[in-house]
Amino acid sequence: MIAKITKGSSFRGVVNYILDKEKDAKILLCDGLFAEDKDTIAMSFEAQSKINPKVTKPVGHISLAFSKEDEHRLTDRAMAEIALEYLKETGITDTQLFIVRHFDKEHPHVHIAFNRIANNGRAISDRNERIRSARICKELTKKYNLYFASGKERVKQHRLKEPDKTKYGLYSILKSEVSRCGDWQQLAANLEKQGVDMRFKYKGKSDEVQGVVFTMNGYSFSGSKIDRRFSFFKIDAALDNNRRNERQEIISSPYRVEPSMLPSESRGNDDLYSGSIGLFMPDNTDGQAEENRFEEELKRKDKKKKQRKIRF
């Protein structure tokens, strides 16, 4: 559940927008208004707002959006009750309002128009309204066991415009690459293949790295602006952790080669023999014995040559 809050000065404008036929609008609740048609609704709002002319933006407009995952549960009555509870918790009470459900999007959502001039003529406070709204949305999402979108993974990137489109593209790339790289050099190389340039920010004129900036499609973002997990220090810690895990896997691997299992150094200068231990030998042949026999044969031939020399 997500709320978007706006304020304005034209009741006629917000009424026409919310009750637009093209948006397939359905009024769920109307309180304190003469609701014969759009004109009478707007006139009712305007009449009460004149009680307190000091407020230049008396129009309140809130859209409450829910996840498509909850569509089967969100009946008209359920959405109206959740909307009323949201208004009560945010302090929007004792004033004119109407709640309308729209069916023009794939996700369930309602629009609320209300008069910021309460029935007693006092202005409804908007102090810290966005902070309070975000907290209340989370509380109601938990209370009614509504689906809670898991951050950036739920963002529909194809609907985004620049520079947000590039920003979320960088998020996806970094999420994949940081988890599998072991150092900054490898990370930079992998990012470059995907059209991402990486550079460090230094403290003053020193060599001390203070941050990291990623550039793609002509847009640049510091790592922490893309996501908190992609600040320089958090990426550095993640890369270091990847290296430690890789070393640990090698040490604990059942297939790790022990020094005693490695082949001995090459004996002689024969290239075929070197690095090809036993490759040209019959099975169960003792290499050392073969070498000894070869040396004995040489000695025997040398002995015969010496004997021939003696005869001459």
Image: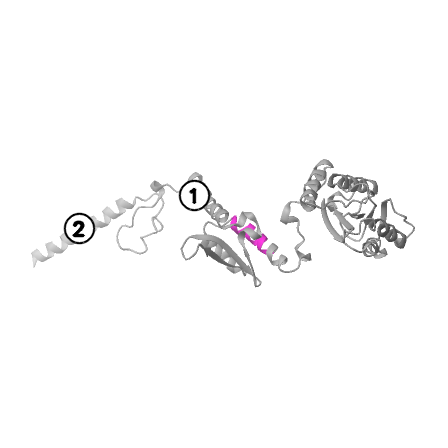
**Span highlighted in magenta in the image:** 169-179
Q: Of residues 312 and 2, which is closer to you in this image?
A: 2
Q: Quadrant of the N terminus?
A: top right
Q: Of residues 206 and 217, which is closer to you in this image?
A: 206
Which residue occupies the extreme top position in the image?
143
Q: Quadrant of residue 204?
A: bottom left
Decide: few, some or many residues near mark 2? Use Cα within 10 Å; few <14, some 14-19, many ≥20.
Answer: few
- Mark linked to residue 125: none
Residue 26 picture location, percent across and down:
85, 49
- Magenta-drawn stretch contains 84: no
Name the colour scheme: one colour
Sequence-wise, the earlier of marks 1 and 2 is 1
For badge 2, the amino acid type reads Arg
Residue 102 picture location, percent across and down:
81, 50
Local secondary structure at mark 2: helix
Local secondary structure at mark 1: helix
Decide: few, some or many residues near mark 1? Use Cα within 10 Å; few <14, some 14-19, many ≥20.
Answer: few
Q: Calculate the distance from the C-alpha at mark 1 to the C-alpha at mark 2.
A: 55 Å
For badge 1, the amino acid type reads Arg
Residue on which the image places disc 2: 300
Kindly report the secondary structure that dominates the magenta region of the rendered protein: helix
Which residue occupies the extreme right position in the image?
36
Q: Is residue 175 left or right of residue 265?
A: right
Question: Which residue: 35% across, 44% down?
Answer: 262
Residue on which the image places disc 1: 247
Q: Is residue 160 left or right of residue 18?
A: left
Q: Of residues 126 and 300, which is closer to you in this image?
A: 126
Q: Quadrant of the C terminus?
A: bottom left
